[in-house]
Image (cartoon, rainbow, N blue to C red):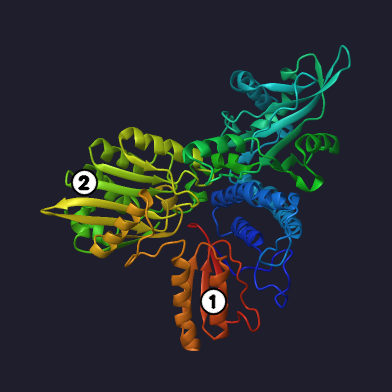
């Protein structure tokens, strides 16, 4: 487990400097540094270190697609608006690139200097082509001809074949090929097929070699009769911005689908290159892709470490965290043992607060949805879906409920970043089952994780609801720490009913008794609580646990509380733009980030 405060970041002023805040982008990168701390932590099991290396790699991919791409757009447009730390976009982009280069070098050192040697010591070997025996090479040649060659498509650049489109996060091999008969030279690109396992197994246990190294070794078979030059393994990252025009879009779903098609062709923002590559191929690629030297990142290991999930999946219990089984929340154990009729009988007596992943998602949230789908007394189910899993039991329960003739209404947030296409698919599946589907609200992303179940009980309707902080995703519910409240209290049920009527209908925002919503409500409520403690001065106390903190109004309220002497502890997983410990401003504020097995 990694526990620390936000450290001084590259490009930031010293603690006594002029800025009250950290830059959002640099604070985001600090979280990635903490993931690498876990890779370096000898108390973390080896294959869990591999997991954190992969998570680091995936988060850096996303950072380039969103944050770096956004800064590049600002610089290109000549925008001079200052970031929270007082930097211009150009200055901030330079600081971000410096931090990224440092982190990539640290990642490379940990992978090659510690993780791969330690894997080898434990009988899990990742090979280079040069280190293979003749028998292994023969085995791979047979695999290449049988499994790889039929799905590979070499593309050559010439006057009738322009430089090929390179898809986002794809792995590729670039090479110069020369015709032996007439001396003509052409540049060719071979895409590493994504539908073939990236780590190819070798005979004799847990031995693997990256697919791209096998492809490089057999390039002459893709270009018979040609002289094959120096190969260049590379990977590109593209801008992932979706520029939806909410005012102009008459149909949000159609507008989003058009933007998803456009996103495939957005500018490249990063070129990753195998570190052994000479300058000539790199110059060719940067020219074709419209990049500069600062956009090139060399790496000595595999490009894109998602291939290492195959190693993390190995059945080596001694190299993993001990097994963890979430507990059934005590009030729901009777339902689990079938001593109680259903979850509704429990919630009719009391509220149930669940803390995932320690409390079981399946025995609480899924239980509510499954019982609601199958109970003939349930008349309606309403739910907000932001992200869910690939084989979602949550969506399956909603589909089943609709097929049983219940009224099902689902707000599916189709603009959830990187889950847009999956959410469009879920929305269509729900519509086909007869559910009413709302594709989000124009101008907003609906982050509410909320469910309402309407049940006939005697002559009255009873409202059951779930309000939580985490997505309706059983997979991430085993990894991420979140809270959820299951309740049948009439006041809360009435508020949740008003909320769903507002987002599915057309009206002014309602007044709530118990719910607090944004925009317009949560910030004011948090500041109100902070100001109450500010009035108490040193006798006050503030403890806040959040995923991120970058709201200026809330941070300024915390600074005022600190100046009044209030002891303040902030537990912040990711981005924190507040600067703790500044004399006269934030001396009583402590910020901690806790990163470990559960995020």
What residue is at 64 percent from the left and 42 percent from the top?
A: 304
Q: Which residue is mark 1?
A: 557
Callout 2: few (<14), some (14-19), or many (20+) C-alpha neighbours within 10 Å? some
Question: Residue 81, which numbered label?
Answer: none
* x and y, in percent, of residue 28 in the image: 62, 59
Q: Is residue 3 above or below residue 442?
A: below
Q: Is residue 537 above or below residue 592?
A: below
> In front here: 129 or 191?
191
* x and y, in percent, of residue 10 in the image: 73, 63
> In front here: 224 or 114?
224
Question: Residue 379, which numbered label?
Answer: 2
Farthest residue in the left direction?
458
Label 2 residue SS: strand
What residue is at 72 percent from the left and 42 percent from the top?
A: 272
Q: Is residue 282 visible?
A: yes
Q: Is residue 596 above or below residue 566?
A: above
Q: Is residue 314 visible?
A: no
């Amino acid at each position: 487990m990694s526990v620390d405060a936000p450290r001084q970041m590259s490009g930031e002023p010293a603690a006594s400097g002029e800025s009250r805040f950290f830059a959002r982008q640099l604070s985001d990168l600090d979280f990635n540094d903490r993931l690498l701390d876990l890779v370096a932590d000898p108390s973390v099991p080896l294959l869990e270190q591999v997991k954190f290396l992969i998570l680091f790699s995936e988060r850096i991919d996303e950072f380039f697609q969103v944050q770096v791409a956004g800064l590049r757009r600002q610089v290109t447009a000549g925008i001079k608006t200052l970031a929270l730390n007082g930097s211009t976009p150009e200055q901030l982009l330079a600081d971000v690139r410096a931090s990224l280069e440092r982190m990539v070098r640290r990642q490379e050192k940990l992978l090659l200097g510690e993780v791969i040697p330690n894997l080898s010591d434990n009988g899990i070997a990742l090979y280079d082509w040069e280190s293979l025996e003749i028998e292994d090479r023969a085995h791979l040649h047979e695999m290449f001809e049988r499994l790889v060659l039929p799905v590979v498509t070499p593309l050559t650049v010439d006057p009738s074949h322009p430089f090929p489109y390179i898809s986002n996060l794809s792995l590729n091999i670039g090479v110069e090929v020369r015709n032996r008969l007439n001396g003509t030279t052409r540049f060719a690109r071979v895409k590493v097929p994504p539908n073939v396992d990236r780590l190819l197994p070798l005979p004799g246990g847990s031995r693997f070699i990256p697919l791209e190294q096998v492809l490089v070794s057999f390039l002459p078979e893709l270009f018979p009769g040609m002289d094959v030059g120096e190969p260049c393994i590379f990977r590109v990252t593209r801008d992932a911005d979706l520029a939806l025009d909410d005012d102009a879009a008459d149909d949000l779903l159609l507008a989003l689908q058009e933007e998803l098609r456009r996103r495939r062709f957005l500018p490249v923002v990063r070129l990753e290159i195998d570190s052994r590559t000479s300058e000539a191929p790199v110059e060719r690629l940067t020219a074709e892709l419209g990049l500069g030297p600062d956009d090139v990142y060399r790496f000595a290991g595999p490009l894109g470490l998602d291939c290492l999930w195959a190693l993390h999946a190995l059945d080596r219990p001694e190299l993993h965290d001990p097994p963890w089984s979430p507990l059934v929340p005590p009030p729901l154990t009777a339902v689990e043992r079938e001593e109680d009729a259903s979850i509704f009988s429990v919630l009719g007596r009391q509220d149930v607060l669940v803390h995932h992943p320690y409390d079981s998602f399946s025995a609480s949230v899924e239980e509510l949805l499954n019982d609601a789908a199958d109970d003939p007394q349930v008349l309606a189910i309403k739910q907000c879906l932001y992200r869910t899993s690939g084989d979602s039991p949550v969506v399956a329960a909603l589909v089943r409920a609709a097929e049983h003739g219940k009224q099902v209404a689902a707000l599916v947030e189709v603009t959830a970043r990187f889950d847009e296409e999956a959410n469009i698919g879920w929305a269509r599946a729900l519509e086909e089952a007869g559910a009413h589907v709302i594709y989000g609200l124009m101008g907003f992303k609906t982050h509410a994780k909320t469910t309402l179940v309407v049940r006939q009980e005697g002559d009255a309707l009873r409202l059951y609801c779930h309000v939580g902080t985490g997505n309706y995703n059983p997979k991430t519910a085993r990894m991420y720490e979140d809270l959820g409240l299951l309740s049948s209290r009439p006041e809360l049920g009435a508020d949740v009913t008003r909320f769903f009527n507002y987002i599915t209908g057309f009206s002014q925002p309602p007044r709530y008794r118990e719910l607090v919503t944004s925009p317009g409500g949560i910030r004011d409520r948090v500041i109100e609580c902070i100001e109450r403690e500010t009035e108490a001065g040193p006798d006050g106390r503030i403890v806040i646990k959040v995923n991120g903190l970058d709201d200026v109004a809330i941070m300024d309220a915390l600074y005022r509380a600190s100046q009044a002497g209030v002891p303040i502890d902030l537990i912040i997983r990711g981005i924190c733009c507040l600067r703790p410990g500044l004399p006269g401003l934030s001396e009583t504020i402590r910020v901690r980030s806790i990163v470990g097995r559960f995020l």
